[in-house]
Amino acid sequence: MPQVTYVDHDGHETRVDIPVGENVMRGALYNGIEGIVGECGGGLSCATCHCYIDEDWTDTVGGPRPRPKPNFWNPRPEKSARPAASPVRWRSRRLSTGSWSISPKRSSEKGRADADRCRKSGSAQLPRHVGMDQVPDHVPPELIRQSGLTVGPDFLANPHDFMAALHEKQPPIYYDVSPMGNMWHLIKHEDALFGLRHPEIFSNEGATPFPRDPNDYFYFIPIEIDPPHHRKYRNIVDPVFSPQGVLKLEGQIRQRANDLIDAIEAKVAAGGTCEFTEDYGRPLPVSVFLDIMGLPQNMRDEFVDWAVKLLHSNDRAIMADSMQKITAYLKQAIEEKKANPDDGVVSRIAHATPDGQPLSDKEIFGFVCFLFIGGLDTVFATLNNIWLYLAQNPDKLAEIHARPQDIDKIVEELLRRWSVTFSGRVLDKDFEMRGIQMKKGDRVTFVLPACNFDPEVFPDPKEVDFDRPRKTILAFTVGVHSCMGAHLARLEVKIALQEWLKRIPSFSVKPGTQIEYRPGGVIGPEHLPLVW
């Protein structure tokens, strides 16, 4: 792979691997390097000038260059006007090692200002195809399905049984047509491992489904940022979400769990009923998350309401309204943290200076917003699923009581059996898998719960087996985009079980209860009344 040697205004050099044809501006901006300017002042490969490193590249920015291709800042460059050749020149030479050496003759301050302007003007919303009339021509008709995943009545009747049955009813790869968007579904464990570990093929850029204002577009960070820039963002919060970081929270989590159980026992003693979702499943992980983020506990229920409408309404208008409320609140919260720093993650991001450079406002917002959405729904859905299962299977409950030393194995198997999320990607290049040709720009969903039911990897996959041979589970995906909160989620599930079972050793679903599931991309029962 060629390397670019960037020379900043003070003459310091930084070498960065950049593939031929890659977007140079992205490498420059996201590594905090000074002096990288192009004919619009935004960079060698910004959304305006479309310049690329290429074997035939000349030392004049406005000179011969290849036809522009979609990139991080401008996914549809053919819609942008090509500017005339610019007089801005660069000293460049091809080194014997196959590297380029580039140094600007314009001020780095001007370059950074214009780069920020150029970045703010870009939008990377990728097209979404919806309906049978928008199935691409390259999709074989025999692979087109309308499975009803996340929205259909069969799915909502029993989501996990539905996804386990996909291995009997559907091919390993099929093209699903849905009111929420058309895309390839992949359900095999080995296919997911490959795809999730190869972001150069299955890109996260533009893969999230949440609506954003095209005039104020931002990226969800770091999930929509592929390598090599992904790591710089994760480094900001790794001290908090690493295994060592989350262990520091153990005492706090146990205290919150016991405080909630105190309230539940008092409520039941007074003649009330435990509604697990509202009394324990939701407030435990959400309260811990708000503590970590440095956000107010008294807004917990309002935050959850916004997240539920965004993730489960399946109505683009409702989703957009929720997104607007989240956006307005978080922008205000970020400004407050800038003015009054604290130990929370929002403040950590707002004041981060990776590579010695502060993050832009859009980077800060995109990072905080992604964590906010991801942290409010997934763990409580997981707890709801697990408690429902244990309430209906007293033999497994007894086994957990009898094997306290195996709690980590128990948690891992429960997470495999009751995975709650999916992982979306966009093909960054044409790719063939299992003889099926997928094209660049196609959307892909790895159906992670179905992958965890793959009978070739997990025999008798619907059975909860605490002695199952250890295999990679996909509850938190894998690869560079694996869930940042995976260690925290495992610890929360572990502590939630331990503290609950110490004080409420047996329980069941309230007689007459009809278990219902919301449509959407996070799977869990909507309500779970328990008795004991």
Image (spheres, rainbow, N blue to C red):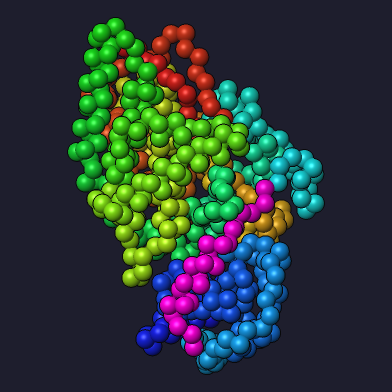
Tell which of 329 and 178 is nearer to you.
329
* Location of residue 135 in the rendering, given as x and y in whole percent from the top left corner: 76, 46
Q: Is residue 434 left or right of residue 355?
A: right
Seen in the picture, residue 438 relative to 469 is either above or below; the reply is below
Residue 475, quarter of picture: top left
Q: Which residues are magenta?
A: 105-128
**Res. 464 in view:** no
* Location of residue 512 in the rendering, given as x and y in whole percent from the top left corner: 47, 8
Q: Residue at x 48, y 77 (%)?
A: 111
Q: Residue at x 50, y 18 (%)?
A: 515
Residue 113 on the magenta segment: yes
* Location of residue 255 in the rendering, given as x and y in whole percent from the top left corner: 20, 32
* Location of residue 208 in the rendering, given as x and y in whole percent from the top left corner: 55, 48
Tell which of 83 and 244 is nearer to you.
83
**Res. 77 in view:** yes
Residue 22, quarter of picture: bottom right
Seen in the picture, residue 154 relative to 209 is either above or below; the reply is above
